[in-house]
Amino acid sequence: TQLLEQSPQFLSIQEGENLTVYCNSSSVFSSLQWYRQEPGEGPVLLVTVVTGGEVKKLKRLTFQFGDARKDSSLHITAAQPGDTGLYLCAGPNSGYALNFGKGTSLLVTP
Amino acid sequence: NAGVTQTPKFQVLKTGQSMTLQCAQDMNHNSMYWYRQDPGMGLRLIYYSASEGTTDKGEVPNGYNVSRLNKREFSLRLESAAPSQTSVYFCASSELVTGDYEQYFGPGTRLTVT
């Protein structure tokens, strides 16, 4: 199993602050996905990064895939309460399905 | 388009009881998955079905069985529930199983075994 380590595990910030969460592995991945899960719901895909060094932007969210394709980061600018949730990274597991990290739980307070 | 639906949403079982969790998708996806989510453990794959007629074990298959009834439906059965199976169970589907494809998740079933 290719392990994905996410940090920090928990993050509590005020509205308007910036933050970065990380997803790291000792293994190379062909791609990485980021999901957001809101309380009481299933995860929803935010983005897939497939090329080493790739940067993708989704409004105030910026995703980066490491040059060596072993790590990824998610940066949120000017966080809002609607960004609250569990952020999960995931990568292909030996050619089938997905291997998920344990997630970063983000709380943004007004 | 309902996406992925799961029933029931909540269930309480006594140790030793059996039950089946139902999952259906209307996106014509080939692959379907069952995960469990526990605090501090993330999502762990129980079983998956790459295509209709095939099923394979994931990371934590012990105590569970699955049936891919047709292309739309994938059920998870607990034959003799144990307290360690208290968890939130998610069904998901994707176009293909290779892992590069987006997975669409249902809303989950919250199971408590007493």
Image: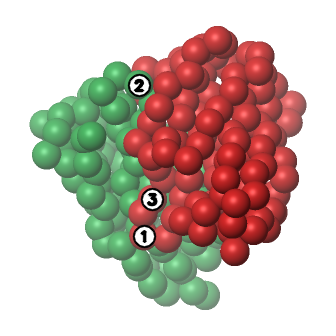
Q: Amino acid at mark 1?
A: Gly
Q: Amino acid at mark 3?
A: Gly
Q: Chain of mark 2?
A: A
- Mark 2, residues whose alpha carbon is within 10 Å: few (<14), some, or many (≥20)? some
Apparent colour of chain A: green
Marks 3 and 2 sit apart, C-alpha to C-alpha, by 18 Å
- Name the residue located 74 percent from the left edge and 16 percent from the top edge: B71
Q: How many marks?
A: 3
Q: Which residue is mark 1?
A: B40
Q: Nearer the viewer, residue B66 or B92?
A: B66
Classify the position of the N terminus of chain A by image quarter.
Answer: top left
At mark 3, the secondary structure is: strand
At mark 1, the secondary structure is: loop
Q: Position of residue B47 (x, y in %)?
A: 53, 35
Q: Position of residue A36 (x, y in %)?
A: 55, 55
Apparent colour of chain B: red
Q: Position of residue B63 (x, y in %)?
A: 56, 47
Q: Chain of mark 3?
A: B
Q: Which residue is mark 3?
A: B42
